[in-house]
Amino acid sequence: MAKRRVLTGGIAQESHSFNPIVTRRERFTIVEGQGAVEHNRGANSAFGGVIDSAHNAGVELIVPALFRAQAGGPVDDVVFAEVSDIMVEAAKRGDFDAIVLPLHGGMLTETLSDPEGLLVERLRAIVGNEVPITAAFDLHAHVKESTLAPLDFLSSYLTNPHEDQSATAKRAFRAAMEILDGTFDPVLAATFLPMLTLGNDTTLSGPLVEIHAYAHNAVEQGRAWDVSIFNTQQFLDIPSIGQTVLAYGNGEIDEARKVANEVMKMIWDYRDDLITKYPALEQQLKDIGQSARPIILGDQGDRVAAGSPGDSTYVLNYVLENKINVDTYFPIYDPEAVATCDRAGVGGEICLKFGGKYSSASPSVTAKGKVISLGANVPVLYDGPSDRGTKTYIEKYAVFKVGNISVLLTNQPYSYMDPDYFRAVGLDPEKAKIIVSRSGYHFQLNFAKIGHVVTVDTPGMSSYYVDQLPWQHARPFYPLDNIEYEPRQYTRRRL
């Protein structure tokens, strides 16, 4: 039997409708070919899961291109068109048995509300109905009928903070192989509900523990072949935003449909318990001077991991105004400030204004300080567990020292969900008392060995006070609107 071949790649990014900064090509890490496979082997990422599955199954991978970027504003239409065309041209060659896509599912472009669905639709038009197409998405994906129509199978992460990116892709890869083997005939029952989870939505505690356990037991009992639960990203101003539950049967749909509806009803019944408020910043910093370990603060209102700009000064202004005199690492996106530091050079003592250009809840900071270091294209390696093994880089940075505060200025926004972002620029996380991360969930896993981790209630584009956002397309949805429990239903069988 000839060795199987799988086409993989695509484009992955999580978008924020209210972030005005368009995500352009320079924000993406771009890999292709066999080098991409070797570079990501063993990584706890969706792409890493595809690679490891292929290796274990003796399957050859074709990687025309994979574009990956951290969360931000909607993606440039030109970038999406470039990736789509690359993937379509590869599909036209037809030298493969299946397509497995490691995507995100929460991406927007300047004009498209379901670009992943459009990409898969274009691929389906090339390969026809015989070639299996499966995908792995983040559990914060926005999934609707147009996403599912061209897909034979879709799997979601089952953890938040995310620990199972690779495992999720392995489910998608397994589905593709078993479709080819004739042992899996995917029949999808999907249900959708216009409702947001807001804050109490980790799978470490709270209602989602019980909900995911129920779904897992349904699979263990053979009631469904696979179940995915999507708690959509909360900042997508597009029609039909909300919760999605997918249950796949193997050749039959009745029991899978029951499972999907039962899981969605649990989500609805817990709707108020899935909303919470985060701890206050002042409470967390009250006794920081006496703390033996660092405190790592997730800046809830300005989470680059959720698509915010990363230039909020709220936490820094609080530290300055309250004269909290401890070693602090504070990252901020400000390309103009980086350029000013670059002109001053290492050792330059300047008065610098930075931050607050896009995140307007707190004013920009003007301070006298010293440029400690400068750099470009410095590598970052996640040591996890969230996204363990992921390799990226900081494009351009400056460390500007104001008293005991090391301000890490960058020309691109970053999430700082892993300690290696700080190590990469010469800042040892073990030596700080306060570290600010632009993440709300995943940093907690990766910084847990460094110190106390907590997400704090701060204002900004990614806070869960969604009633303050200028919605135009997504409403009505719970909890901003009173809605009846009337979930939409969708089914799909392979043709």
Image: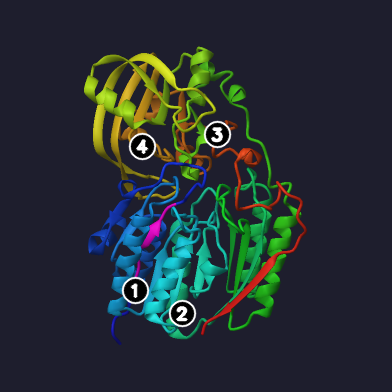
3D distance between C-alphas at marks 3 and 4:
23 Å
**Nearer to the camera, 47 or 124:** 124
Instruction: Give whichever of discs 4 and 2 has the lower sequence position.
Output: 2
Q: Name the residue under label 1.
A: 6
- Residue 12: in magenta span: yes
Residue range (magenta): 7-13
Instruction: Give whichever of discs 3 and 4 has the lower sequence position.
Output: 4
Task: Name which residue type carries label 2.
Answer: Glu
3D distance between C-alphas at marks 1 and 2:
13 Å
3D distance between C-alphas at marks 3 and 2:
45 Å
3D distance between C-alphas at marks 4 and 1:
33 Å
Provide residue 131's location: percent of width, then percent of height.
41, 81
Instruction: Give whichever of discs 3 and 2 has the lower sequence position.
Output: 2
**Nearer to the camera, 195 or 58:** 195
Q: Quadrant of the N terminus?
A: bottom left
Q: Residue 178 carries which label?
A: 2
Going by the image, does 267 lie left or right of 379? right
Per the image, label 4 sits on a secondary structure element best described as helix
The residue drawn where x is 31% and y is 61% is 82
Provide residue 33's location: percent of width, then percent of height.
24, 64
Task: Name which residue type carries label 3.
Answer: Gly
Q: Toward which corner of the image does residue 53 lie, by quadrant?
A: bottom left
Per the image, label 1 sits on a secondary structure element best described as strand
Provide residue 117's location: percent of width, then percent of height.
48, 66
Q: Mark 4 points at which residue?
A: 421
Task: Tell me the crowding category of disc 3: few under 14, some 14 to 19, or many 20 or more residues within 10 angstroms, Cα based.
Answer: many
Task: Name which residue type carries label 1.
Answer: Val
Going by the image, does 221 lie left or right of 102? right
The residue drawn where x is 42% and y is 46% is 384
